[in-house]
Image: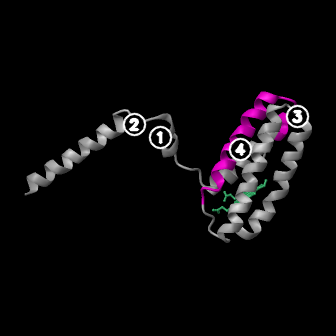
Amino acid sequence: MLRKITSVVAGLGMAALVLAFGGFGTAADDKKDDKTPTIKEIMAKGHKGTEAYMGKVKAAVKAEKWDDAQKYAKAMSVFGAALGKNKPKKGDADSWKTLSEKYAGDTKALFDATEKKDAKAANDALGTIGESCKACHTPHK
Ligand code: HEC
């Protein structure tokens, strides 16, 4: 009996291996398996202090170092898109959906502005993001 179970388990294990390595492993799957960054991680790496992405984007835009600005703004927009996949510990789901989607849109607008090397649009987007912190922290933090 035990031997039979063992062989069934071993068989399943093989099937899983074949599935995993048998041509189904695409880049998209790899991406999906990546752990979604937590809200804390997005917040801390995104805007905590001058070493965070937002501070780096601000400084780079000011210095017109567009490669840097694009790199950090891209990181913010990737985080922005991931924020809504998390669930905040406070606040209702509809409000979270609205505010996290707004953050995704605002960080995307920032990235688009840096791609166009448009300092005014970039500063506007930075201003919009800077004004959005409290509106989301009050209900959700
Ligand atoms: C769409 C919602 C949203 C926006 C916009 C937002 N935050 Fe947050 N933030 C949160 C939530 C939710 C938490 C609580 C995370 C937790 O403790 O799990 C948080 C936590 C934080 C923290 C604490 C992180 C830690 O290490 O515990 C910092 C710092 C922070 N936010 C900074 C900012 C700043 C600065 C801005 C604006 C530039 C901002 N946040 C915009 C939702 C938001």
Residue that badge 3 annotates: 118
Question: Does the magenta portion include 62?
Answer: yes
Considering depth in this image, is 134 or 97 the residue closer to the camera? 97
Quarter occupied by the C terminus: bottom right
N-term mark: 1 or 4: 1
Is ligand 1 within 8 Å of the beta carbon of the residue shown at mark 1?
A: no
N-term mark: 2 or 1: 2
Q: Which mark is residue 77?
A: 4
How far apart are the two marked residues, 2 and 3, measured between alpha carbons?
Answer: 42 Å
Question: Dot 1, crowdedness within 10 Å: few (<14), some or many (≥20)?
Answer: few
How far apart are the two marked residues, 3 and 4, measured between alpha carbons?
Answer: 17 Å
In percent of width and height, residue 35 lies at: 52, 48
Residue 112 appears anywhere in the view: yes
What's the residue type where badge 1 is placed? Asp
SS at circle 2: loop
Q: Residue at x 76, y 31 (%)?
A: 68
> In this rendering, which labeled residue sits more in front, label 4 or label 2?
2
How far apart are the two marked residues, 1 and 4, measured between alpha carbons?
Answer: 21 Å
Residue that badge 1 annotates: 29
Considering depth in this image, is 104 or 140 the residue closer to the camera? 104
Residue that badge 2 annotates: 24
Q: Which residues are magenta?
A: 58-86
Ligand 1 placement by image quarter: bottom right
In percent of width and height, residue 62 lies at: 89, 35
N-term mark: 3 or 4: 4
Classify residue 51 by image quadrant.
top right
- Is label 2 in contact with label 3 (beta carbons under 8 Å)? no
* 26 shown above or below 139: above
